[in-house]
Amino acid sequence: MKKLFLLIFFFGITSTGFCQLKSRTFEEVDSLQQIQKRKIIVFIHTDWCQFCQRMKATTFKNKEIIEKLNSDFYFIDFNAEEKRDITFNNQVFKFKPSGNNVGVHELALQFGTINNQIVYPVLCVLNDNNEIILQYNNYLSPKDFKVLLEKIKDYNQ
């Protein structure tokens, strides 16, 4: 019985371990594009956004979504309030303070601004030339996100 429990426990851990979403950094994606061209999906969020946290807990925990993102795209999980300088596409982007310990990163503004405002969560899809081909600012359920992935997978621009 003890061996059976250990066997089940081991397979439970390894099977969930194989289904981890690979989140990249902007710097990594710059290098990876030299090796294999893929569309980039940037998930722009904040720690205080309830819909962002809900997407992290549901949509980005879905096995089918994880597999599709890992195999067909480069995925960047980006906190809009990141304070470090980031080099992407031969440009340096910085955190822009707007008050006492608050602000937004220039990359979040670059990729998340829709109609002159940024509303979280934001999904920004870039082609393999780092050009924006889609922006969406709203919660996406796993079902809706799967539909979106199918549409953008074969989208060429």
Image: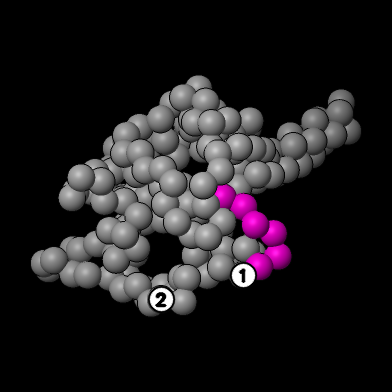
* Image coords of residue 101 (percent x, y): 18, 67
Spatial separation of the CA atoms under disc 2 and disc 1:
14 Å
* Image coords of residue 136 (percent x, y): 35, 38
Residue under label 1: 31
* Image coords of residue 102 (percent x, y): 18, 63
Quadrant placement of the N terminus: top right
Is residue 70 rendered to the left or right of residue 118?
right
Task: Check disc 1 and report its element: helix, strand or loop.
Answer: helix
Q: Is residue 101 above or below residue 40?
A: below
Residue 12 found in image quarter: top right
Amino acid residing under circle 2 = Gln
Query: Badge 1: how crowded within 10 Å, few (<14), some, or many (20+)?
Result: few
Q: Residue at x 52, y 26 (%)?
A: 147
Q: Is residue 146 above or below residue 35?
A: above
Most foreground residue, 21 or 138: 138
Task: Check disc 2 and report its element: helix, strand or loop.
Answer: strand
Residue 64 found in image quarter: top right
Query: Badge 2: how crowded within 10 Å, few (<14), some, or many (20+)?
Result: few
Most foreground residue, 15 or 134: 134
Q: Which residues are magenta?
A: 34-39
Amino acid residing under circle 1 = Ser
Residue 110 visible in image = yes
Residue under label 2: 91
